[in-house]
Amino acid sequence: MKRRDFMKAGAVLGLSTAIPAFSIHQHLKKNYKVGILGYGDRGSGLHGVLSQMPDQFTVTAICETLDFRVQNARKKGLDSKIKVFKDHREMADYKNVDVIMIATPLSMHFEHAKTALQAGKHIYLEKAMTHTAEQALELQKIHQQLPKQVIQVGHQYRYSPLYFKVKDYIQSGYLGEVTQVEARWDRNHNWRRHVPSPELERQVNWRMYEEYSGGLVAELLSHQMDFVHWAFDTVPSSIYATGGIDHFKDGRETFDNVQATVRYNDAGIIGNYGATCSNQYEGYIFKIKGNKGTISLLMNDGYFYPEPEHLKELQQVDGVSGATKLEWSDNRKGIKLVTEPLKDGTFYALQDLFECLETGRIPYSNVMNGGNTAIAVAMANKSLKDGLPQRWV
């Protein structure tokens, strides 16, 4: 490696600013009125983040079919000025709402998004975008007819400063030629939520039933799959997945143990994605492996580990070139990617949503790339069910 390459490496690898710059300009002053559709853990969580952005958003309505959730929200101080609906169509027609944030079960995403769009609302739509590939394609067509309405899909890695930085590393060539991705999201828990009454089982624990849910692939692994699509500008050419209900014999229908192997022919990459509900030892793993180095990620932390032939040169960057000081791990074998605390990924996403609403820019996570990830999730789930490889057509 020549001296000018030392300096280039130091300049890029030392950057803590290779992140999205969400600048809310002086002229961006409108406060958008928000209706939250679905007020479970995720919907109420969105409300919590919105409360940190009072100059940009005000929650004026919620829609929730389960009475106990509304009652609990009122006990916790839900503003009495917020109008409560049970029918999503009525909230979509409510004139005191500009943006509808959809945090309902996956099987309802398409219907709820379609209704909101046709009522003239902008949308924040939780991932996965839709339950089926056909729904993803149809929602894309609907949006083409209503292009002035913003649709942001909740794949938040596309907004995280950490993951923006990782994308920059990949595109700048510091990993070299990437051929393998290893991703896991493991827990040792049955994934159930408390049900106040037996007849509400399927409504509360919808993630466990095929009618409503995409299971572990949709709820967890879709985040990592979407990042690979984004970072490498690719989609799967084929997916083979296997799994089963191997630990929790409790009447669930979605698998508690899954593994998917994904081939990206155009990128020359194999992606290995897995999740289990019966072991938490490794927890969250996301490793991107190139012939010059590996990036190892947690949700809010990460390191770049150069391959041995590049490690020594990079360790000498500070002294040789005087370039920006690299943040090394304690053993000097890895470079830290995070040098300051990060906010919740939803905060960064909603910052971008506001800017898109004001400027008309397309969100980084949108109906097109969000649809591609929904299709990939549907392919993986079909392979899980049928035991056959699925090909992108």
Image (cartoon, grey):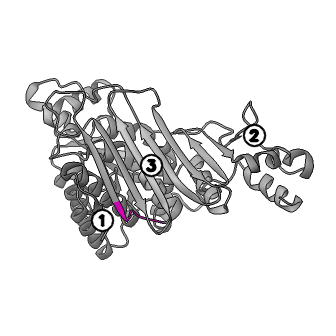
Real-space CA distance between mark 2 and mark 1, rounded to the nearest whole angstrom: 42 Å
Whether residue 56 is visible, yes or no, is no
Asked whether residue 139 is drawn in magenta, I would say no
Element class at badge 3:
helix
- Left/right placement of residue 26 relative to residue 60 reads right
Task: Give the residues in magenta.
Answer: 234-238
* 193 vs 295: above or below: above
Looking at the image, residue 250 sits to the left or right of residue 259; the answer is left
Q: Residue at x 16, y 32 (%)?
A: 67
Q: Specify the label residue 327 is tagged with.
A: 2
Q: Which residue is drawn at 69% across and 39% down?
A: 339
Disc 2 marks a residue whose amino acid type is: Glu
**Left or right: 158 as drawn, with respect to 336:** left
Using the rendered view, name the quadrant where residue 70 is placed.
top left
Q: Residues within 10 Å of mark 3 (few under 14, many from 20)?
A: many
**Residue 64 quadrant:** top left
The front one of 147 and 198 is: 198
Q: x and y percent of residue 60 in the render?
A: 32, 46
Amino acid type at circle 3 is Gln
- Say which label, 1 or 3, has the lower sequence index: 3
**Magenta stretch secondary structure, dominant:** loop
In the foreground, 371 or 90 = 371
Cα separation between marks 1 and 3: 19 Å
The residue singled out by tag 3 in the image is 224
- Bin the neighbour count of mark 1 within 10 Å (Cα to Cα): few under 14, some 14-19, many 20 and up: some
Say which residue label 1 marks.
Answer: 391
